[in-house]
Amino acid sequence: MEAYGKIRIKLNELIQQKGISKSKLSHRAEMQRTQLNNYCKDQVTRLDTDVLARLCTALECSIGDLLEFVPPDKENT
């Protein structure tokens, strides 16, 4: 998989920028706190488009604000 790069979830950064608590976000996005924490820690192996849509709506952001493509040559930097 490393040969293709990876998708990085920037949720933790977005939460800080927006000044919203994880509890408030989990309520707004109708997510369990453990699921939200996994997204915050970038520990999700399969992205759920419904979850991404709820996060974008709750945070009033675009998908590009939430996800970042990290090319294979930049992964370990």
Image: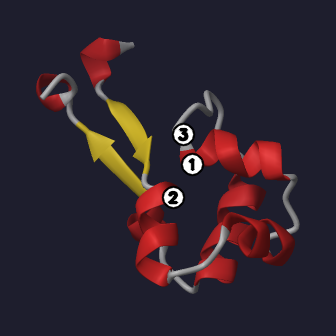
Badge number at residue 25:
none
Give the distance between the C-alpha atoms of the residues marked 3 and 2, in whole angstroms.
8 Å
Relative placement, left or right, of 51 versus 63 is right
Q: Amino acid at mark 3?
A: Lys
Q: Are marks 3 and 2 in contact (CB under 8 Å)?
A: no
Q: What residue would you read off at disc 1?
A: 40
At 69% across and 65% down in the image, what residue appears? Answer: 22
Q: What residue would you read off at disc 2?
A: 11
Q: Of the residues under marks 3 and 2, which one precedes in the sequence? A: 2
Q: What residue would you read off at disc 3?
A: 41
Q: Amino acid at mark 1?
A: Cys
Instruction: Identify whether 42 is placed above or below 2.
Output: below
Under circle 1, the secondary element is: helix
Give the distance between the C-alpha atoms of the residues marked 1 and 3, in whole angstroms.
4 Å
Under circle 3, the secondary element is: loop
Q: Amino acid at mark 2?
A: Leu
Give the distance between the C-alpha atoms of the residues marked 1 and 2, in whole angstroms.
5 Å
Residue neighbourhood size for the residue with mark 3, other residues' Cα within 10 Å, grouped as few (<14), some (14–19), many (≥20): few
Image coordinates of residue 34 in percent, x first then y, are 80, 43
Relative placement, left or right, of 17 versus 33 is left
Image coordinates of residue 67 in percent, x first then y, are 43, 55
Instruction: Identify whether 14 is placed above or below 18.
Output: above
Relative placement, left or right, of 60 versus 34 is left
Q: Of the residues under marks 1 and 2, which one precedes in the sequence? A: 2
The image quadrant where one finds the C terminus is top left
Q: Are marks 1 and 3 in contact (CB under 8 Å)?
A: yes
Q: Are marks 1 and 2 in contact (CB under 8 Å)?
A: yes
